[in-house]
Image (cartoon, rainbow, N blue to C red):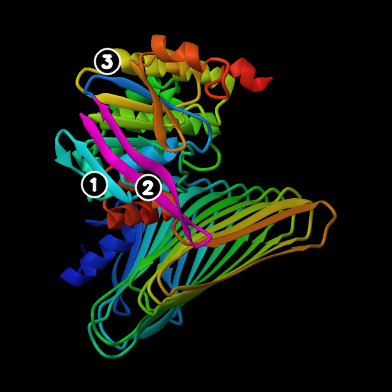
């Protein structure tokens, strides 16, 4: 791995499943500095002139290529806001892996706020994977406030997988998407909070063109005395279909507020929302215990499956 | 061998103790296929849950191969070789059929072995192995997957609580075939089925009739069935549908 220490390498493994330098385009950022970059014939990465972030440009028709842009923070007290813009050319089909890992062993708060904007060209397909992870036993908080904006042109599609399973003390996620005719958005959010963590996740999806579809599904687990707020709004401004679902397991002293909402401004907009909060069912635990698992092992299996 | 000695169980109802099982004695030998039947409310399912340890008895003993398992938890009984198929199988969001079979077998189960268990219960393995055990599965499918988890466990005692409940006629024919096969391969293990169904009673080595938490009759199908036919339980499928 490029100029990274052991902690940073571990963080990269957690957030991007990377054990070595990936093939394809990448941009590594460690403690606020560029730690490595690679571009390809089809994917260009350049730093913004004002130094606030990077631009990723993917040529039209690029197929089966990937971009990795992991960020790691291992110094206590570091706060940064980064603006990354992705321009995905028409008919491209790519995978983008982002993510941030914070290790804070110090007493000062560490914070990374990534603002990602996606401009998805006509008929392009994007799979976007974002993982957040925190570690370190310092008193300083690990804070992540990501903003994701996606603008989908006609016939394009975007699949977002957002995962935050461990160690982030405070997070406020904001996701805004605008879809033109025939565009398709699928969001899979997985969230687990523990200790005294607080997580807020908000979505605003505007379906502006005929045949646009959105499916926003969040599954979360709130343990210990952590709290979560899920706020998803889908607006249908054309003949379109949208579905949002928030499904949560509540444990211990956890608290969860789910506010799915829908707005239809067209008679042919078909919008559905679902929300469910509940503890792990006793018969689920019993069933797995009849297979020889202890109660704790059963609980882990149920949560792992739920957050898959 | 399973031995139940002087077993009693009660529930609290309006601040009173209501006894569901009364001083029950029952021995299930190895290599036997035993069906416990009786009217609704006779305590059949409660007895099955007591064997698995899901319910705790008021008094009495349960012995598995001579070991007193009365005080053991569900997990410990499972590890000693007791399996249990639920009357209403549990659904899990996110857990796949392959995961459940892997957990049941207690080892890293290959796809081909997992598929073999599914085929045995009449499910096209390729269509089911990666399915989530959620509400997209029908009652009959869930029931068959539940039975497949018991096949994957290969334990010395398998208890099925009303396997026919909630499944359609077509699935029921398959269910009988599965039990006939299990019976032919029983060897040293034993199978206990809680059932109302005549077809299941017919393939039993022994039928135990329960009423009001007590055993009222016990014997081979030839001895017991003629007496039972025409009573409220068991009844044939056709009779139940009338």
Q: Which residue sits at x=34%, y=22%?
A: B34
Of discs 2 and 3, which sits in the foreground? 2
Whether residue A196 sits left or right of residue B239 in the image: it is: left
State the residue position of label 1. Answer: B70
First reached walking from the N terminus: tag 3 or tag 1: 1
Q: Quick one: B126 or B4, which is closer to the camera?
A: B4
Q: Chain of mark 1?
A: B
Image vertical order of residue B234 relative to residue B166, above or below: above
Q: In the drawing, does residue A108 fall left or right of residue A131?
A: left
Q: Which residues are magenta?
A: B1-28
Circle 1 sits in a helix, a strand or a loop, which is it?
Answer: loop
* Residue B157 rendering spot, x and y as whole percentages: 26, 30
Front-most of residues A7 and B138:
B138
Residue shown at 46% from the left, 50% from the top: A94
* Residue A180 included in the magenta stretch of the image: no
Determine which of the numbered discs, if any, sits on residue B9 in the image: 2
Q: Which residue is identified by label 3?
A: B185
Left or right? Give the position of A174 relative to A55: right
Chain assignment, label 3: B
| Residue farthest toward the top in the current orientation of the protein | B222
Q: In this orientation, which residue lies closer to the viewer: A31 or B129?
A: B129
Can residue B20 be seen in this snapshot? yes
| Badge 2 element | strand
Q: Is residue B203 above or below residue A88?
A: above
Q: Mark 3 and mark 1, same subunit?
A: yes
Q: Position of residue A95 (x, y in %)?
A: 44, 52
Mark nearer the N terminus (2 vs 3) = 2
């Amino acid at each position: 791995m490029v100029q990274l220490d052991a902690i940073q390498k571990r963080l990269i493994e957690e957030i991007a499943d990377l054990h070595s330098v990936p093939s394809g385009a990448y941009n590594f950022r460690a403690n606020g500095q560029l730690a490595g970059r690679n571009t390809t014939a089809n994917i260009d990465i350049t730093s913004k002139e004002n130094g606030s972030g990077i631009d990723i440009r993917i040529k039209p028709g690029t197929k089966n290529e990937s971009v990795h842009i992991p960020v790691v923070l291992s110094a206590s007290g570091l706060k940064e806001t980064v603006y990354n813009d992705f321009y995905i050319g028409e008919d491209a089909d790519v995978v983008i892996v982002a993510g941030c890992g914070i290790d804070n062993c110090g007493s000062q708060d560490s914070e990374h706020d990534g603002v990602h904007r996606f401009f998805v060209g006509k008929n392009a397909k994007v799979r976007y994977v974002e993982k957040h992870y925190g570690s370190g036993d310092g008193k300083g908080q690990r804070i992540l406030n990501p903003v994701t904006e996606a603008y989908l042109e006609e016939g394009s599609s975007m699949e977002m997988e957002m995962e935050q399973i461990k160690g982030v003390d405070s997070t406020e996620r904001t996701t805004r998407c605008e879809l033109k005719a025939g565009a398709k958005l699928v969001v899979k959010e997985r969230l687990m909070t523990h200790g005294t963590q607080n997580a807020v996740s908000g979505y605003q999806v505007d379906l502006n063109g005929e045949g646009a579809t959105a499916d926003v599904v969040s599954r979360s687990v709130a343990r210990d005395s952590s709290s979560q707020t899920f706020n998803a709004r889908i607006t249908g401004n054309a003949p379109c279909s949208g579905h949002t679902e928030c499904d949560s397991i509540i444990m211990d002293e956890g608290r969860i507020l789910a506010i799915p909402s829908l707005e239809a401004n067209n008679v042919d907009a078909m919008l559905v929302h679902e929300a469910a909060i509940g503890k792990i069912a006793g018969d689920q635990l019993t069933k797995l215990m009849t297979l020889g698992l202890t109660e704790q092992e059963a609980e882990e299996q149920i949560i792992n499956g739920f957050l898959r | 061998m399973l031995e139940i000695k002087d077993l009693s169980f009660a529930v609290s109802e309006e601040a009173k103790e209501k006894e569901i099982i009364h001083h029950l004695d029952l021995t299930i030998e190895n290599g036997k296929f035993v069906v416990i039947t009786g009217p609704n409310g006779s305590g059949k399912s409660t007895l099955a849950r007591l064997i698995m340890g899901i319910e705790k008895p008021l008094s009495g003993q349960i012995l598995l191969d001579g070991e007193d398992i009365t005080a053991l938890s569900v997990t410990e009984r499972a590890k000693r070789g007791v399996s249990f198929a639920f009357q209403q199988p549990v659904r899990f969001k996110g857990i796949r059929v392959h995961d459940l079979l892997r957990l049941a077998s207690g080892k890293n189960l290959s796809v081909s072995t997992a598929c073999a268990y599914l085929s045995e219960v009449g499910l096209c393995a390729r269509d089911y192995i990666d399915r989530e055990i959620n509400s997209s599965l029908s009652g009959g499918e869930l029931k068959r997957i539940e039975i497949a988890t018991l096949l994957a466990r290969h334990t010395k005692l398998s208890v099925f609580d009303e396997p026919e409940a909630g499944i359609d006629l077509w699935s029921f024919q398959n269910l009988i075939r599965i039990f006939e096969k299990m019976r032919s391969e029983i060897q040293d293990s034993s199978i206990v089925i809680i059932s109302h169904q005549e077809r299941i009673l017919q393939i039993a080595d022994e039928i135990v009739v329960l009423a009001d938490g007590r055993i009222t009759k016990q014997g081979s199908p030839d001895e017991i069935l003629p007496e039972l036919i025409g009573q409220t339980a068991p009844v044939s499928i056709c009779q139940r549908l009338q």
